[in-house]
């Protein structure tokens, strides 16, 4: 008896709902504003990831090596505070053979300049140096800088080196901060 009563009530409710849904008098309206936005992931790229360094020393003088290093960025200021570009020697530094013996120049005796900035020495332990660092705001969140990175041997160390071509490899890397 109780089950039959529940069935009857459920049937009546279903009919009432169905009839109100089909009725011309029952209308449901709603208004909503939907805003969609798409953002690209934050990126920073350097045109070259590994650059060869080759410095010619003759008669106590040296050639200063200049390599292109173009930087492009697209950063969301809500996600990133800025970025930096690092240069790190792949090995211990530069080297050449003189009289059958390897003559090594450690990374901390090598200096680099970027975009016309002052030359700075590579770190003794890290073999690296920050070439460029930039804080990001809505006004500079996208950009590009076409420039060059320069390498030379520190003048104090240069005086002790024999003539030759000193070669090595430097890794350029961009990091989002």
Image (cartoon, grey):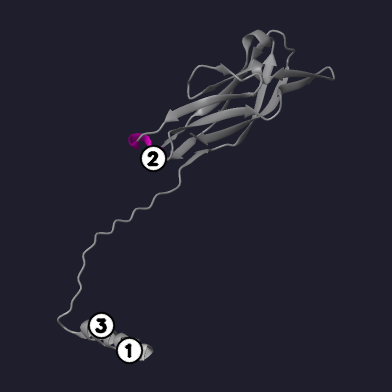
| Residue tagged 1 | 5
Number of the front mark, 3 or 1:
1
Is residue 140 magenta-colored?
yes
Residue 25 sits in quarter: bottom left
User: Which element type, helix, strand or loop, lies under badge 1?
Assistant: helix
Q: Earlier in the sequence, mark 3 or mark 1?
A: 1
Could you say which is closer to the camera, residue 131 or residue 51?
A: 131
Q: Secondary structure at mark 3?
A: helix
What are the residue bounds of the magenta stretch?
138-142
Residue 78's disc number: 2
Looking at the image, which residue is at 70% across and 25% down? 167
Report whether 152 appears left or right of 104.
left
Q: Quadrant of the N terminus?
A: bottom left
Q: Which of disc 2 and disc 3 is earlier in sequence?
A: 3
Residue 111: image location, x then y, percent: 60, 18
Numbered badge on residue 17: 3
- Counting from the top left corner in percent of width and height, residue 116 is at 48, 21
Q: Secondary structure at mark 2?
A: loop
Residue 8: x percent and y percent?
A: 31, 90
Give the mark, 1 or 2, whose residue is nearer the N terminus. Answer: 1
> Which residue is drawn at the image coordinates 52% and 25% (left, top)?
131
Q: Quadrant of residue 34?
A: bottom left
Q: Residues within 10 Å of mark 2 (few under 14, many from 20)?
A: few
Q: Say whether marks 3 and 2 touch (CB < 8 Å).
A: no
Describe residue 16's horizontal placement relative to residue 159 as left or right.
Answer: left
Horizontal and vertical percent for residue 156?
A: 65, 8
| Residue at 71%, 24% in the rendered image | 92
What residue occupies the far left of the structure in this picture?
A: 25
Q: Does the CB distance between marks 3 and 1 fall below 8 Å?
A: no
Would you call the spot at circle 1 few (<14 residues within 10 Å), some (14-19), or many (20 or more)? few
**Rounded to the nearest whole Å, what is the CA distance between mark 3 and mark 2?**
49 Å
């Amino acid at each position: 008896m109780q089950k039959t009563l529940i069935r009857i009530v459920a049937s009546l409710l279903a009919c009432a709902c169905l009839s109100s849904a089909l009725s011309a008098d029952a209308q449901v309206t709603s208004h909503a504003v939907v805003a969609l936005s798409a953002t690209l992931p934050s990126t920073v790229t350097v045109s070259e990831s590994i650059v060869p360094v080759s410095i010619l020393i003759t008669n106590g003088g040296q050639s200063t090596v200049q390599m292109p290093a173009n930087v492009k960025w697209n950063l969301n200021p809500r996600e990133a505070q800025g970025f930096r570009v690092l240069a790190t020697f792949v090995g211990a530094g530069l080297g050449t053979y003189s009289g059958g013996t390897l003559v090594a120049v450690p990374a901390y005796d090598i200096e680099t300049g970027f975009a016309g900035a002052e030359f700075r020495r590579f770190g003794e332990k890290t073999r690296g140096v920050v070439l460029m660092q930039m804080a990001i705001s809505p006004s500079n969140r996208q950009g590009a800088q076409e420039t060059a990175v320069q390498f030379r041997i520190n003048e104090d160390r240069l005086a002790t080196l024999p003539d030759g071509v000193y070669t090595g490899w430097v890794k350029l890397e961009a990091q989002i901060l």
